[in-house]
Amino acid sequence: MNFAKGVDLTLHEGTPILSFEGVTVAFKSPGHSADRPVLSRLKLTVDEGEFICLLGPSGCGKTTLLNCVAGFQPYEGNIYYNGARIEKPGKERGVVFQEYALFPWFTVEQNVEFGLRVNGVQASERKERARHYIEMVGLAGFEKHYPGKLSGGMKQRAGLARVLANEPGILLMDEPFAALDEQTREKLQAELLGLWEQQRKTCLFVTHSIQEAVYLADRVIVLQPNPARIALDLRIDLPRLRNRHDERLLQFQSRISDALREGERPYGEHLSVITA
């Protein structure tokens, strides 16, 4: 069955902005002399402007992979961003965490300005850019509020504005909506897609939710653990905004559920993109 009938498949095809070549990460395991491999010889390419969701069971390496791209986690092999090997954090890679990571003693405006101040941006430009992105995420009027006075959804909007204000080339999002109630989560998913449609930044989004992944992504990468391998690389060729009850969306969800249940797929570094 072809889920992509009538959809332009070339929309996000382009130049790879991010490439993983034989990426390996191992951690010390208590009580064992040998390190435990979390990622092993992983290969993957990401095109500029793609929205990719990383999905898989707990401990499968999703966050570890994201941390490698962010420059937080040492690794073997190579990860290239725009042709340069990633070796440390950089302002061209913006990270949105599950925890809101806001300074409680700063107002929304001060939190959004923080990275700009660290990077030496002049005060007038800081103010202008902060207000622009605060308005973009729907927090106009809350510039002088402190995080303790904001709802969970508003805190996550403020965190996103802080990252966007630095104008990164790629967004790295680690389960940013996991702690929110379902209604707020769905609202922020739609708002995130609206922002993404405006800017078309490349996005790597970690989630445990099949429904969230299929609703948001151009591609869903399903990881299986011990060590992490790509069990499925599935292109979601459906127009946005998507109807959460669309039968085609449910069929994609079923395909991903099957891949997660299989779990015993023979080891391979990378499987082809599936569009049907």
Image (spheres, rainbow, N blue to C red):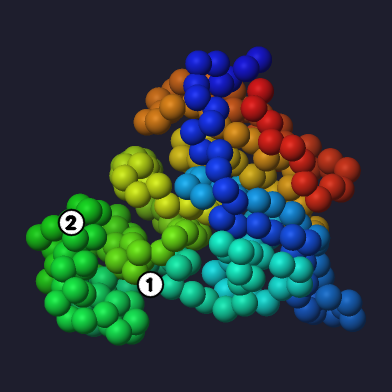
Residue shown at 21%/75% (left/top)? 126
Q: Are marks 2 and 1 in contact (CB under 8 Å)?
A: no
Q: In the rendered structure, which amino acid carries the disc numbered 1?
A: Ala
Query: How many residues crowd around disc 2 within 10 Å: few (fewer than 14), some, or many (20 or more)?
Result: some
| Residue 33: x %, y % from top left | 89, 81
| Residue 75: x %, y % from top left | 71, 73
Residue 146 in view, yes or no: no
Between disc 2 and disc 1, whose residue precedes?
1
The one nearer the camera, 182 or 126, is 126
Query: How many residues crowd around disc 1 within 10 Å: few (fewer than 14), some, or many (20 or more)?
Result: some
Instruction: Determine the secondary structure under disc 2.
Output: helix
Instruction: Determine the secondary structure under disc 1.
Output: loop
Q: In the rendered structure, which amino acid carries the disc numbered 2?
A: Glu
- Residue pointed to by mark 2: 135
Left or right of 51? Residue 271 is right
| Residue 187: x %, y % from top left | 31, 42
Up the image or down, 36 lies above or below 242; here it is below
Q: Quadrant of the N terminus?
A: top right
* Circle on res. 237: none
Residue shown at 51%/45% (left/top)? 50
Residue 71 in view, yes or no: yes
The one nearer the camera, 181 or 10, is 10
Tally of numbered discs: 2
Residue shown at 26%/80% (left/top)? 121
The one nearer the camera, 189 or 240, is 240
Up the image or down, 17 lies above or below 64; here it is above
- Residue pointed to by mark 1: 101
| Residue 272: x %, y % from top left | 74, 37
Left or right of 223? Residue 12 is left
Left or right of 23? Residue 31 is right
Residue shown at 21%/81% (left/top)? 122
Residue 43, picture quadrant: bottom right
